[in-house]
Image (spheres, grey):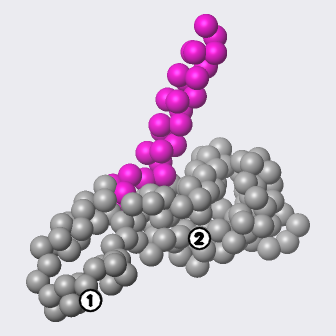
Amino acid sequence: MRITTGTEYSLIIMLHLGRCKRVGDGAVPARELAETEGLPADYTEQIFLRLRRAGLVQSVRGAKGGYFLSRPPEEISVRDVMAACERQTFEVNCETHPVNDDRCSPAAACSIRPLWAALQQRIDDFLSSVTLADLMKQEASVEELVAISNSD
């Protein structure tokens, strides 16, 4: 399993938008978000395009334009965000392994593929069970812990 930079940035972007929605702000310009979060501006624009195509964000044009979540944070799972960026969360490339082609043909009886498929399902189920709202709640706890350790 590999978490790409695009996936990590996508989660950062979605959490940022979730926090803005929580405090009642309007649409957030991509460049402003990129600057606030320390993300590359051009890459942030590309990620927003993927998130918009996946139906996770909506955009507003104009001087007060920008992006906002298309659904409440409680209704957007980590899996939803990852699916906007990745084909799979746990990729198995049986066809590209340097093993005898006959051994890895789709018709061959392989006892390993079901293991990978089951693992893929468990990962997806877990990621589907965690929402942006869950991560936002954790942020508050982390902020409290950081404040406590900084006061010492």
Residue 132 is one of the magenta-drawn residues: yes
Q: Is residue 57 visible?
A: yes
Q: Is residue 124 left or right of residue 13?
A: left
Magenta region: which residues? 127-152
Q: Amino acid at mark 2?
A: Leu
**In the image, residue 36 lies at what x, y percent?**
76, 47
Pair 2/1: label in front? 1
Residue nearer the viewer, 129 or 120? 120
Instruction: Give the dominant element type of the magenta stretch: helix, strand or loop.
Output: helix
Quadrant of the image containing the C terminus: top right
**Count of marks placed on residues:** 2
Residue nearer the viewer, 129 or 43? 43
Q: Amino acid at mark 1?
A: Asp
Q: Residue furthest right?
A: 63
Q: Is residue 152 left or right of residue 40?
A: left
Alpha-carbon distance for marks 2 and 1? 37 Å
Classify mark 2: residues with Cα within 10 Å, few (<14), some (14-19) or many (20+). many
Please tell me which residue is depicted at 45% across the width and 75% down the height of the picture. 87
Please tell me which residue is depicted at 40% across the width and 66% down the height of the picture. 89
Residue 4 lies, with reference to residue 58, above or below; the image says above
The image quadrant that residue 147 belongs to is top right
- Residue bearing mark 2: 51
Quadrant of the image containing the N terminus: bottom left
Element type at mark 1: loop
**In the image, residue 14 lies at what x, y percent?**
59, 57
Residue 145 is one of the magenta-drawn residues: yes
Residue 126 lies, with reference to residue 64, above or below; the image says above
Element type at mark 2: helix
- Residue bearing mark 1: 101
Q: Earlier in the sequence, mark 2 or mark 1?
A: 2
